[in-house]
Amino acid sequence: MPTGHDRDRQRQQNRALAELTASKTELVSALLHELRTPLAAALAVIGLLPEQTGDPALDDVLPILSRNLRRIDDVVGEIAMISGIENGTIQLDQVPFDLPELVAEVAGGGSASASAAASASAAASASAAASGDLFTSGSVTGGSFTGDRERLGQAFRRLLAAVRALGGDGTIEVAVVDGHWQVAFRLPPEQPTDRLFTGGGGQGNAMALMLARAVVGRHGGHVAVETLRGTPYLCATLPR
């Protein structure tokens, strides 16, 4: 049974965590403000320049400069969105939907034929999970999950694109493990798992991981790399 000392220590830890979270939020807000002001001015100047200046060297540089400024602008916008999801200023829907069906859509890439094939694959995965063939100790008796379908779909699509960019085969498996949903993205076995999203081949993948952690975390879950049946997977675990 917790003692008074234990409760005091827990309160202190919770207070420290809250202060750390608040400090992070303030830091991100300050950085975004400092980035957006000069960035907006630079984009405005680029927008005023003609497509052709008559100077071959300048004409070669301007498109590159414009492209990279817009890329930075996109990243800043995404950081703001991720920060908003993490700190709760961006609200998430709480609507029941079929999670395996969403995973099938993500795996199918949106086309009708691919979606049908992915649905069959997801159904097979669910059947395998029920028989214990998939990495699970539970059974799949229903696919209902309550949360933000659009945000989770966005996070899963980004993770899938990131894993494919690393050389993954695009396999996604969904199962129930110890009473939780587990959406697992198969990783290439030769890729060092400690550098999946920071190595030279993972450009942009760190943002995908940040987004997934924010969205899955707001749903009461977590994202981690796990080894299943001797194969590395990037797993999003959600409550069921």
Image (cartoon, grey):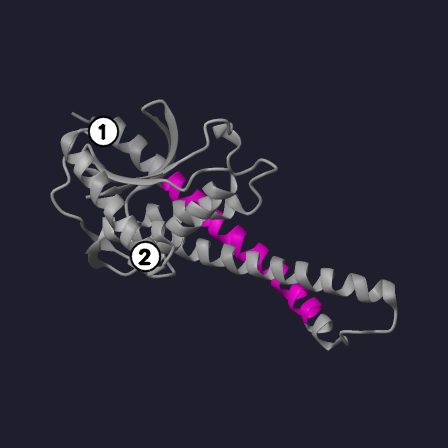
Q: Is residue 68 left or right of residue 162?
A: right
Along the line of sight, the residue nearer the viewer: 220 or 235: 235
Q: Which residue is mark 2?
A: 113
The 10 Å Cα crowd at callout 1, few under 14, some 14 to 19, many 20 or more, is few
Q: Position of residue 128 (x, y in %)?
A: 19, 34
Q: Nearer the viewer, residue 43 or 83?
A: 43
Residue interval drawn in magenta: 15-43
Foreground tag (1 vs 2): 2
Asked if the magenta segment contains residue 200, the reply would be no
Main SS of the magenta segment? helix
Q: What residue appears at the point 50 percent right and 37 percent down from the top-left corner?
A: 167
- Please state which of residues 233 and 92 is positioned toward the viewer in this rendering: 233
The N terminus is located in which quarter?
Answer: top left
The answer to whether 187 appears left or right of 35 in the picture is left
Residue 102 image offset from top left, x and y in percent: 28, 53
Q: Is residue 182 visible?
A: no
* Mark 1: amino acid: Gly
* Residue for point 63% across, 63% down: 70
Looking at marks 1 and 2 on the same chain, the residue that comes earlier in the sequence is marked by: 1
Q: Relative to residue 194, is residue 20 depicted above or below?
A: below
Name the residue that disc number 1 marks. Answer: 4
Mark 2 element type: helix
